[in-house]
Amino acid sequence: MAKSSTVTKPRGILGNSALRPDGAHKVQGSFEFTSDLHAENMLWGATLRSPHPYARIVSIDTSAALALSGVQCVITADDVPGKPTYGLISSDQPVFAKDIVRYMGEPVAAVAADHPETCRRALALITVVYEVLTPLTEPEDAIAGTFAPIHPDGNVIRHQRILRGDQNISGPIVVEGDYVIGMQDQAFLGLEAALAIPDPDGLGLHLHVATQWLHEDLTQISACLNLPADKIRLTLGGVGGAFGAREDISLQVHCCLLALKAGRPIKMQYSREESFFGHVHRHPATIFMRHHADAEGKIIKIDARFVFDGGAYTSTSPAVLINGITHTQGPYKCDNATVDGYAVRTNNPPCGAMRGFGVVQACFAHESQMDKIAAAVGKSPVEIRLINAMVTGDPLITGQIMESVAPVARCISETDAIPLPEPLGLSVNELSLPGGSGLTASRSNIVRGIGWGVSMKNLMYSEGFDDYATARCTLKDGVASLKFATSEVGQGFVTLAPQIARSVLGVDEVILEPIDTQIGSAGSTSASRQTWMSGGAVDGACRLVRERLFHHVGLMHSIDPLRLVIDGTDVVDQVGTFRITVAEASDGIEIIETFEHHHRATEELDENGQGNCHTAFAFVAHRAVVDVDPELGLVKVVQIATAQDVGRVLNPLSAIGQLEGGIAQGLGLAVMEEIVMKDGKVRNPSFTDYLLPTALDAPDVVAVMIEEYEPQAPLGAKGIGEPPCISVTPAIVAAIRNAIGKNIERIPVRPQDICL
Amino acid sequence: MSANEFYSLHVNGKPMPVQDSWVGESLLYVLRERLGLPGTKGACEQGECGSCTVLMDGDAVCACLVMAATAINSEIVTVEGITSDSALSDVQRSFVEEGAVQCGFCTPGLIVAVHHLLEKNPQPSEFEVKEAISGNICRCTGYGRVFAAVEATIRSRTEAK
């Protein structure tokens, strides 16, 4: 079970590379991930999934499974006592399919048994008779209305346009492209897992789960179980990465239902194959984009049409669509735009949140377009981006004014100033060429290319959603305790929160209380938002405590509290000689304060896509150097140079880790990662067939942090999680184009896209 | 399950009886679920990700690919047995200090793989390091800090001589 952990040396305040408080446990293997949890008398749970993308369920017979020795119970849609569906934005996804299955892998039943192998055998004994239907797999068919609705809510999940400025204006330069983005998987290492423990009275339960958003899970679970929220307690189990894939419900409701029915603790954990079916993916998309520019290459107008394939259920598709279309312009000035966007329902796997959230798709298109403009006017990729670079105060195509610090030109220039790698010499180690230890390449065949990508990314949630965060700080005898429901998925909030407390309160020791639903929501660990939002909440709670501490010290020592400040670990009178340690000052007292941080209000877009829909923005530039074997179509990414707008670096070690990790994921989308679909069926649900970047694929990363304090951010720091993975992908593809002189408009770039 | 097999494994220098086991269980499952050694992680069950890396008679293997009952005559070392006491090894310390740990799910496998590498090859080249850990997938770090941790370990071992 989750335990309070004590954080002591080394003293880490904001700006220092404080070390992870869970680091020692993680390197020793003693950190408890959710899949490591056990409970007395525990059973295992497992899910039966549809083998068909679209079929009518004629009958389900569970009797043989129930008769198997070791099986405790089998549940189907008939066993859901509350709301039969769930969903983050629209509650349109069944807990279990009842009459219709709408994607390959949709849950149909679940079993509880004494051993994982018993579960597997029981699942095989459940007989489901299906009447197979022809699946809707082409998003354009969903838009055209030529396919009968596959769901009562229809085949178009959301349609939104943006009309800005002069709709008929053009310029001497017109470039266009049809861009295709494949389906990427988050591929976190720690598979979905949960442990549900029913209360002794059978009236409630305690769920330990690896999730990004405890309170949203609680709301959805409570409705499906038909249990009041106060009868369900959620505690964050150790989370092995997330990247968006844990924002939606996966096994949460199933696990709770089994536990309540069995009256015993139930543990569920997915296999890798099941994980590919059990969580949402990055939306595949097609994007048409046409840029009109003047003779200098300055953007006059953009026309675009976006189609995001949302798969069978809504998940976050409406928000992904808005993110995509509102980032059509990228980090560039643009006064006129005609944008049309669709998120559609198909019988493909449901798609939802993944790091970059709609902006990854838009960025691949707009950055490919920038290079086309550059070529048309005879400018370099750097020049074309600099003359179009957005600045603070510019209007966006939604009419919203860019109020965030926007050092776009600086990101580009400082990336450009990073030295290029050594040229590919004749005496190169052949193992480092494309193809690696396969030794498929000879030095003389290899061509090198350089490419650019620059991006803008919104931070926090949009369209009027108040995704606030809550934190509580307790100061007692010189020790601070922090309580919040912020999901730690690996990003390092558990490192940052004590840094904030040490900086604000002058304490050394900070205790982190269990992360659970025994406090208000922290919102989701997504949208690059927790440093800003939960960081703001911890900062706010600590400041309230500090104010009361100063008041207490003022009373005790007859000093005006307004004269007191924290200096290191002391309380100091800044106009006198009084000085005592925080430990002495707080001796024998206990101060508790809770704070909610809310970001500025946002609003929905109107029918023409106008409105202040986003909260804040961050920017980054990437320059990629690649070596390509044109004969075999293999690519080696040699170097990524990057300068990222971070506001302020709060922990240099955590920050570089986010940049390098995001770059690797963007590299994956550029050249290797794709869930391959055929007729609605996933063809590669395994790490054998879904390729991920390894240590041998990792490029040299040279990174510069652009620190321009963001006044709107509570700590001056912008979120940094998503930007690294956004523009690195188009940069790598541009470098491949530059190397081989061929236009490529699809990611991931496959060998045949290069050599055929 | 009809489960009445009995055998014994030799793990981290100690004999460990395995009771009531189904003979089809993998070494990964037995270590985690029967011997109370959850440090070895499962993430792909196909030998692709390296999260379950353990040492078997001195070789780094994926525990998910080994049938536990076939390992009865082998010396097995898991991440829990990398050090003889509760202190961190130099590799473990470097991982923490150089920022090589984020979510930490791949970390135990990487720790075993790096110990194994430096045991066999105390002064590996940059390329040899990459090749040695290329069977251990990390989704969080992009590997940059992992390389830094390995370099820091090599540096500290060289300086200690």
Image (tube, coloured by chain):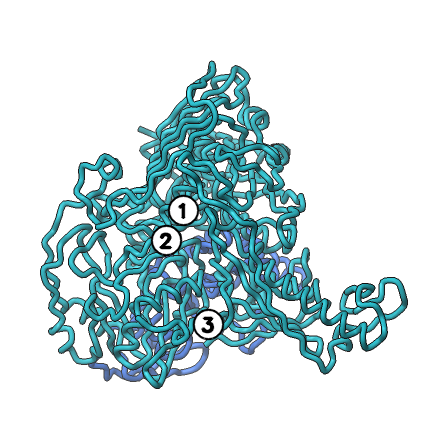
Location of residue B14 (image quadrant): bottom left
Location of residue A190 (image quadrant): bottom left
Dot 1: within a 10 Å radius of its alpha carbon, few (fewer than 14), some, or many (20 or more) residues?
A: many
Chain of the residue where label 1 is placed in the rendered structure? A
| Residue drawn at x 48%, y 27% as measured from the top left | A370
Give the tally of numbered discs.
Answer: 3
Q: Position of residue B11 (x, y in %)?
A: 41, 77
Q: Which residue is mark 3?
A: A32
Kindly state the secondary structure of the residue where label 2 is placed.
loop
Label 3 is placed on what type of residue?
A: Glu
Q: Which residue is mark 1?
A: A319
* Distance between the alpha carbons at the discs numbered 1 and 3: 33 Å
Q: Position of residue A294 (x, y in %)?
A: 51, 17
Q: Which residue is mark 2?
A: A89
- Chain in cyan colour: A
Discs 1, 3: same chain: yes
Q: Nearer the viewer, mark 2 or mark 3?
A: 2
* Distance between the alpha carbons at the discs numbered 2 and 3: 31 Å
- Chain in blue colour: B
| Residue drawn at x 55%, y 58% as measured from the top left | B100
Chain of the residue where label 3 is placed in the rendered structure? A
